[in-house]
Image: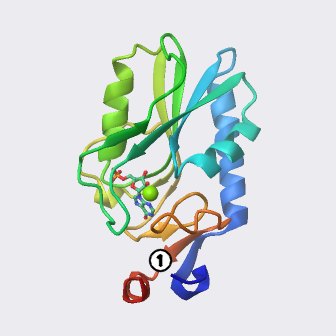
Amino acid sequence: MQDYHAYLEEVLITEEELQNRVHELGVEISQDYTGKRILAICILRGGGMFLTDLIRHIEPLVAVDFMGVSSYGVGSRRSDGEVRIKLDLSTSIVDQHVLIVEDIIDSGHTLASVIEMLRTRNPASLEVCTLLNKFSRREVDVPIKYCGFNIPDKFVFGYGLDMDEYYRNLPFIGVVDLEKYEADV
Ligand code: IMP
Ligand code: MG
């Protein structure tokens, strides 16, 4: 495993484009939740960077909590539909306006399971905000209220998204050259 330059096929979304869009989403969310309190639930680990940037642009009261889920392990690039909860919320969501903050929706399995589980806990409302959406890969339907970018069916890294746990720190979204990467690791 090397420095990211070795595996970067192209920059798909620049840092500036990301920051502008995240700001827009924050403004839209602020308008929709005027007069309400938001409980933003970040899906770890990929959603971390998006959440911390997004809430800077949210004006209504907003609390945050974290949920750790994993749909596939190191070395695998697709979710098998079997979602594991690695870390549960530390607060109750009963009667809360819950906003799930996710990095990317691919097959939809991860979020569909999370939504199903959270619904049973009786929140006042439950919406999804995802930074990226790979619609062409969808296997189960997921209701998305806020979406940053629709992207093609390519494996991406950066801005919270990892390649086998690394490269989350890149400030942009890049397409991974999988051939080069797989040959190397
Ligand atoms: P899904 O269950 O197939 O929708 O997968 C969603 C999860 O897979 C996301 O939360 C990401 O952690 C991961 N994922 C899907 N596509 C990518 C990608 O292109 N790069 C990095 N992680 C990805
Ligand atoms: Mg991941």
Q: Nearer the viewer, residue 97 or 74?
A: 74
Give the percent coordinates (x, y) of residue 101: 53, 40
Instruction: Determine the quadrant in which ligand 1 lies.
Output: bottom left
Q: Report if residue 146 is visible in the image.
A: no
Q: How is the image coloured?
A: rainbow
Where is residue 171? Give x, y as percent.
68, 65
The residue depicted at 62 percent of the width and 23 percent of the height is 38
Name the residue carrying label 1. 176
Q: Residue furthest top?
A: 95
Q: Residues within 10 Å of mark 1 (few under 14, many from 20)?
A: many
The image position of residue 30, as x and y in percent, is: 69, 29
Picture quadrant where residue 63 is located: top right
The image shows residue 182, relative to residue 134, as above or below, that is: below
Disc 1 residue lies near ligand 1 with CB under 8 A: yes
Q: Is residue 159 left or right of residue 138?
A: right
Q: Residue at x 37, y 83 (%)?
A: 182
Task: Please name the amino acid that badge 1 sits on.
Answer: Val
Tag count: 1
Point 48% across, 11% down: residue: 94
82 to 5, vertically: above or below: above
Quadrant position of the C terminus in the picture:
bottom left
Is residue 21 found left or right of 44 in the rendered image?
right
Seen in the picture, residue 147 relative to 180 is either above or below; the reply is above
